[in-house]
Amino acid sequence: MSESRSKRSREFEQQVLEHVDMLYAVALRLTRNPADAEDLTQNTFVKALRFHDKFKEGTYIKAWLLTILRNIFINEYRRKTRRPVEVELSGFEAAPESFPDPEIFIEPRENNVDELLELLDDPVRNALESLPPDFRNAVIMADLQDMSYKEIADIMGCPLGTVMSRLFRGRKLLRDALGDYAKQRGVQGNGRE
């Protein structure tokens, strides 16, 4: 490698390193996980340095780096969604209990909320019943009665945005109230929302 080319490579590397904090912040916002964000940032730098000859002088390097980061993130996401989830079982795991019994078919009568609530475990039912009425009704209609936001808005006599807000807040209150219950059952969300 010629000396001028080597100098250009070092200068480019220095330019790229100036953006490490910004790229990590964007990666963290995308992945929502510090370890994954570090991997994404590192992969971005490796790719940027490997293809530094493709970088055109005068191009905004920050935008170029963000494009690389975004493309790596999208490709990784696509790759993960195509791959089936792998679980290794040793044979000593306890079988999870399932309620209600899947062998028993129960078709609640339409609009009979009490029958729907009877299908829930006591802690879930109690948490749901402890919600403020507007939140509880929105959650029941959306998650137990499988109604659309529009149907809920019509029944509750409020705008669609209000229904969405009530659902978001009601579900968050349920998540908070049922955190320990979910851990005991081996059911935990991804922490989003």
Image (tube, rainbow, N blue to C red):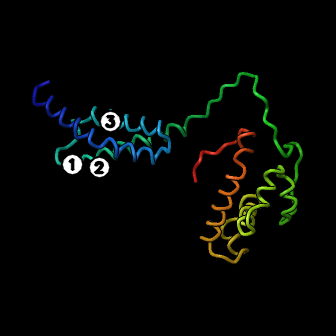
Determine whether, in the image, residue 63 is placed left or right of residue 170: left
Q: CA distance from mark 1 to mark 2?
A: 8 Å
Q: Residues within 10 Å of mark 2 (few under 14, many from 20)?
A: few
Q: CA distance from mark 3 to mark 2?
A: 13 Å
Q: Mark 3 and 2 residues: CB-CB less than 8 Å, in contact? A: no
Q: Amino acid at mark 3?
A: Phe
Q: Which mark is residue 45?
A: 3
Q: In terms of image quadrants, where is residue 114?
A: bottom right
Q: Amino acid at mark 2?
A: Ala
Residue placed under numbered mark 1 in the picture: 59
Determine whether, in the image, residue 108 is placed left or right of residue 60: right
Image quarter hosting the N terminus: top left
**Residue 166 image point, x, y percent:** 65, 66
**Residue 91 image point, x, y percent:** 75, 22
Q: Which mark is residue 24?
A: none
Q: Residues within 10 Å of mark 1 (few under 14, many from 20)?
A: few
Q: Mark 1 and 2 residues: CB-CB less than 8 Å, in contact? A: yes
Q: CA distance from mark 1 to mark 3?
A: 17 Å
Disc nearer the start of the sequence (1/3): 3
Disc nearer the start of the sequence (3/2): 3
**Residue 61 image point, x, y percent:** 25, 46
Residue placed under numbered mark 2 in the picture: 63
Determine whether, in the image, residue 107 is placed left or right of residue 49: right
Q: Residues within 10 Å of mark 3 (few under 14, many from 20)?
A: many
